[in-house]
Amino acid sequence: MSAPPLTPKQLQVLESIRHHQEETSLSPTMQELGAVLAVNRVTVYGHVRALLQKGYLENLEPGASRGLDLTDLALEVLKRRRPEPVAKEELVSTANNPAAPPHPFVGLKLPLLGRIAAGSAIEVLEDRNDIDLSDFLNTNEESYMLEVQGDSMIEAHIQSGDFVVIRRDITPSPGDIVVAILEGDDIGQGSEVATLKRFFPQPDGSFILQPANAALQPIYCDHLEVRGVVTGVLRSY
């Protein structure tokens, strides 16, 4: 029987656990895993629960903060992925290498030439200011963009064809618009599904993903992965 498939994030969780065990001889806590993966503890818990169900993790001490351990199945998968050691003479110093290119919005400015009426007429302004798009869209090196397909968020002024700006490093608050990754089994599909919805965690640990379209129903799920919070919307005409 073939091993259950792993998502990229689930594989990253296993690799993070192995690295922590090799460094400290202890299994990481949920908080430590979240810090390494740059996600919140709720998201980490969803991945860990899926890995327990698939047989890649076992809970040796239920209720303990460091009770998780890798199973033989996980160790075999990770063994196949471990790279061969690099010969010392092959290592290249990065001291003289150019720095990574900046985020595309950093330093990009457009002139603000005044205001224009969308209702009654207003006075024309001659003063010029520059708008830094990285500030306007709240972007940094953890930002990326997605093109929207569908009309589930139209009442939040996000239309099909718009581009949403996402920050990976922001912990979502209730009501934030997030990129949510759902296990396909939870919604009757065979693979992971990504969706853009308002995020509402529930006291029992479950979640409600609320569309901004009165014609659509919310999504109820026990676990999900949040891959960022929307900080801006771009639209071309």
Image: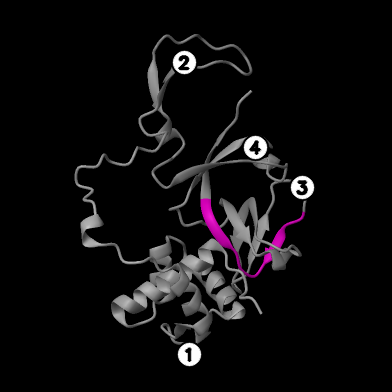
**Residue projecting furthest to the bottom:** 61
- Mark 2 or mark 3, which has the lower sequence index? 2
- Quadrant location of the C terminus in the rendered image: top right
Kindly identify which residue carries mark 2: 114
Provide the residue span drawn in magenta. 217-228
- Mark identifier at residue 214: 3
Q: Tell whether label 1 touches label 4 (CB within 8 Å).
A: no
Kindly identify which residue carries mark 1: 60
Question: Closer to the observer: label 4 or label 2?
Answer: 4
Residue at x-position 61% and y-position 79%: 53
Q: Amino acid at mark 1?
A: Leu
Left or right: 124, with 128 as reference point: right
Instruction: State the SS at label 1.
Output: loop
Q: Tell whether label 1 touches label 2 (CB within 8 Å).
A: no
- Mark 4 or mark 1, which has the lower sequence index? 1
Crowd band around label 2 with a 10 angstrom C-alpha radius: few (<14), some (14–19), many (20+): few
Q: Is residue 177 above or below residue 206?
A: above
Question: Closer to the observer: label 3 or label 1?
Answer: 1
- Mark 4 or mark 2, which has the lower sequence index? 2
Percent x, y of residue 120 = 62, 14
Percent x, y of residue 114 = 46, 15
Kindly identify which residue carries mark 4: 157
Instruction: Place residue 36 in its image quadrant.
Output: bottom left
